[in-house]
């Protein structure tokens, strides 16, 4: 472990010598400065862990040195030293960013305790910030990939909601669309970013265990009351993400609605109200929640409450323009993780990915790229690397395709127009690829698009 560096900014040589000698005996690395300007220069050029700053200096007042240091170094704790201590001076020093204030003459042991407490506090803050930055790197908005119009709307909603005072947010989207990534992005873009981000999945818990997990529990033990805090309490002023809210019972939904409306809750068996401080983000992969409300399977009042601030995440098949971006993103990530050297994906392989249905959404695409890159060791992902369900080998193609005419009949032009629209949607408007799917020339396709008034 490297020695912690302490800077002493003090004009009295004897005090500097005494402090330096005793601090070095306590395994600190010590720098000295005899005036304010020299001290400021020293801290600009050295990675200092703590500053001992005299209040009265020959060139600049210590309080001015403190302000200037804080402009470029916000982490190192600064302990002010003075022979003219007063409550007013102490308040001013703390307000300007000092960790604490000590009155001369002082006992070295008193100062040493203060130094160790300051360094422990700073070390803890740095560790919390390091973990926060790591989590932000993993879960932040930069890891939500998309340039499509649909995803731009999602990004806009994330930014607006993150900065809002909303305490209940609803994220709707099919399984695998990245709802948890969106929830974490909202957390890290908000002023709650330094607070905890916790999560749970409703579908994995019974009602009783879920209530205990969320609200906590009080029990009478051999040595008095035993308290188990729930996730809502542990999240403090941070964010709690509750996945798959649609799997809960009506009675639990009623309890949850009351908590959201009253902004307080009780632990199981508890008698005291606890204020709701955290933001709760809910998600559901069921697209028919509104229908469930009508049938009585989901509490309509809770649905209305959650729908006030909501985000609809589009399925991957509705934003296929993002597939090339996602593929390259996953390739870059897995190159680093698996120490591979893939440069990209061949065009014919990408075309197959673009025409596939992606029922598993982004998660399915990610799993596919991961599987290929674990097994293969080459420069490009190729068509032969893709599974049968994407290549289409498992689909029997009959020599003659039969479509059955409905008993009530059908307009042939409607069928033709519908297939043209499907082909254009599947190929993201690429007329060459659409004409190939339909077995006609591009000119014929353009003629029929004009005939049916289908815009380019």
Image (spheres, rainbow, N blue to C red):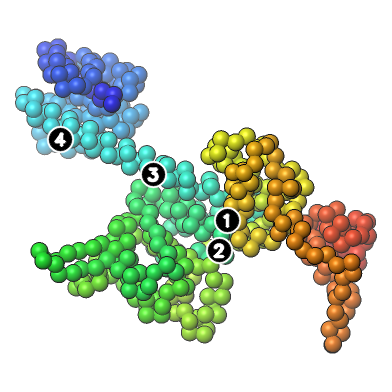
Left or right of residue 62, residue 146 in this image: right
* Quadrant of the image occupied by residue 109: top left
Q: Secondary structure at mark 1?
A: helix
Pointer 3: what residue? 132
Task: Report how far apart the C-alphas of labels 2 and 3 lie in the structure.
Answer: 27 Å
Mark whose residue sits in front, 3 or 4: 3
Labels 4 and 2 touching (C-beta < 8 A): no
Left or right of residue 223, residue 312 in this image: right
Q: Earlier in the sequence, mark 3 or mark 1?
A: 3
Task: Report how far apart the C-alphas of labels 4 and 1 lie in the structure.
Answer: 56 Å
Q: Earlier in the sequence, mark 4 or mark 1?
A: 4
Is residue 320 visible in this depiction of the protein?
A: yes
Q: Secondary structure at mark 2?
A: loop
Mark 3 nearby-residue class (10 Å; few <14, some 14–19, many ≥20) = some
Task: Report how far apart the C-alphas of labels 4 and 2 lie in the structure.
Answer: 56 Å
Residue 354: mark in rendering = none
Mark whose residue sits in front, 4 or 2: 2
Mark whose residue sits in front, 4 or 1: 1
The structure residue drawn at horizontal position 57% and vertical position 59%, both measured from the top left corner, is 177
Task: Report how far apart the C-alphas of labels 3 and 4 lie in the structure.
Answer: 32 Å
Q: Earlier in the sequence, mark 2 or mark 3?
A: 3
Is residue 64 visible in this depiction of the protein?
A: no
Residue 90: mark in rendering = 4
Q: Please provide percent x and percent y for residue 262.
A: 31, 72
Pointer 2: what residue? 175
Mark 2 nearby-residue class (10 Å; few <14, some 14–19, many ≥20) = some
């Amino acid at each position: 472990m490297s020695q912690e560096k302490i800077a002493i900014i003090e004009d009295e040589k004897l005090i500097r010598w005494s402090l330096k000698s005793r601090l070095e005996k306590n395994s600190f690395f010590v720098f000295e400065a005899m005036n304010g300007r020299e001290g400021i220069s020293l801290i600009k050029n050295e990675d200092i862990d703590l500053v001992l700053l005299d209040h009265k200096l020959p060139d600049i007042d210590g309080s001015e040195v403190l302000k200037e240091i804080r402009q470029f170094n916000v982490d190192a704790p600064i302990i002010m030293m003075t022979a003219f201590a007063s409550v007013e001076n102490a308040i001013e020093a703390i307000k300007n960013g000092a960790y604490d204030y000590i009155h001369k003459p002082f006992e070295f042991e008193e100062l040493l305790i203060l130094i160790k407490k300051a360094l422990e506090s700073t070390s803890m803050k740095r560790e919390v910030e390091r973990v926060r930055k790591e989590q932000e790197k993993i879960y932040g908005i930069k890891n939500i990939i998309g340039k499509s119009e649909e995803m731009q709307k999602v990004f806009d909603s994330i930014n607006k909601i993150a900065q809002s005072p909303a305490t209940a947010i609803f994220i709707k989207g099919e399984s695998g669309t990245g709802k948890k990534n969106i929830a974490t992005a909202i957390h890290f873009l908000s002023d709650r970013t330094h607070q905890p981000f916790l999560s749970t999945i409703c579908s994995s818990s019974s009602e009783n265990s879920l209530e205990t997990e969320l609200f906590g529990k009080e029990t009478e033990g051999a040595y008095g009351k035993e308290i188990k805090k729930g996730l809502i309490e542990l999240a403090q002023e941070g964010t709690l993400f509750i996945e798959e809210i649609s799997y809960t019972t009506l009675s639990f939904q009623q309890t949850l609605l009351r908590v959201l409306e009253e902004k307080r809750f009780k632990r199981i068996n508890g008698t005291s109200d606890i204020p709701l401080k955290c933001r709760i983000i809910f998600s559901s992969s069921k697209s028919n929640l509104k229908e469930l409300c009508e049938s009585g399977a989901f509490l309509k009042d809770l649905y209305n409450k959650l729908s006030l601030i909501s985000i609809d995440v589009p399925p991957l098949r509705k934003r296929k323009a993002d597939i090339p971006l996602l593929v390259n993103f996953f390739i870059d990530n897995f190159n680093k993780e698996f120490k591979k050297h893939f440069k990209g994906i061949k065009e014919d392989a990408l075309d197959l990915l673009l025409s596939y249905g992606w029922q598993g959404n982004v998660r399915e695409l990610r799993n596919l790229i991961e599987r290929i890159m674990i097994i293969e060791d080459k420069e490009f992902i190729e068509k032969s690397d893709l599974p049968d369900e994407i290549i289409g080998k498992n689909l029997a193609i009959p020599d003659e395709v039969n479509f059955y005419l409905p008993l009530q009949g059908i307009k042939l032009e409607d069928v033709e127009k519908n297939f043209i629209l499907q082909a254009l949607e599947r190929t993201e408007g690429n007329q060459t690829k659409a004409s190939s799917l339909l077995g006609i020339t591009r000119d014929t396709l353009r003629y029929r698009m004009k005939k049916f008034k289908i815009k380019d």
